[in-house]
Image (spheres, helix red, strand yellow):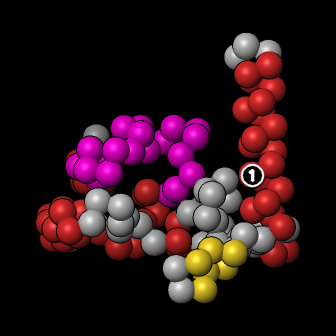
Amino acid sequence: MPDKELGFAQWYAVMADLFKLNPNPDAPEQAYDYRGFYEKNVRGKDMEFIRSSVKQFGKNPEVHVFTDEFKKPEHPTFSNESVYNDSTKGIVGGRWEGEVFFPSEFNKRLAMEQQLKQLNGIINGD
């Protein structure tokens, strides 16, 4: 395993344990680009970031350290701050005003599609 991937894997394992995330950062249901976040914000200062995250989590377990910048379109609070926000493709996230999230039409449509998919799974016994 190359050093770059090893560093990410070690960091993600700690974050997954701390924040109760799926242990597989590449699982299809992941709605966040943890690799993108790691590359931009963490690589080279892994232990410093981990210590800071543990300290922040200890003060408020509800707070995550992951920014909107790497939320994928299927994330419930996918916003216009994400690198995946692309109005030319109709992928337009909601917006934040302070602590309040205002979903876009894209957010609402995707949420409805996800709910219908879950209902179909329940009905069909999936």
Q: For the C terminus, which image quadrant?
A: top right
Residue plotted at (83% across, 56% down): 109
Q: Which residue is mark 1?
A: 111
Horizontal side of 7 relative to 92 (left or right) equals left
Name the spot of residue 22 as percent of width and height, x first.
Answer: 41, 39
Name the spot of residue 68 as percent of width and height, x first.
Answer: 52, 71
In front of the other: 17 or 86? 17
Q: Main secondary structure of the magenta part?
A: loop
The total of numbered circles placed on residues is: 1
Name the spot of residue 80 as percent of width and height, x first.
Answer: 67, 77
Q: Amino acid at mark 1?
A: Ala
In front of the other: 40 or 70? 70
Horizontal side of 110 relative to 69 (left or right) equals right
Q: Quadrant of residue 108?
A: bottom right
Residue 62 lies within the magenta run: no
Q: Quadrant of residue 13?
A: top left
Q: Which residues are magenta?
A: 12-33
Secondary structure under badge 1?
Answer: helix
Residue 29 lies within the magenta run: yes
In front of the other: 19 or 102? 102
Residue plotted at (27% across, 66% down): 60
Residue plotted at (34% across, 44% down): 20
Horizontal side of 49 relative to 63 (left or right) equals left
Q: Can residue 111 be seen at all in this image of the molecule?
A: yes
Q: Can residue 6 be seen at all in this image of the molecule?
A: no
Q: For the N terminus, which image quadrant?
A: top left
Q: Point out the residue furthest to the top here.
A: 125
Name the spot of residue 10 as percent of width and height, x first.
Answer: 23, 48
Residue plotted at (26% across, 44% down): 17
Horizontal side of 46 relative to 66 (left or right) equals left
Q: Is residue 86 above or below residue 62?
A: below
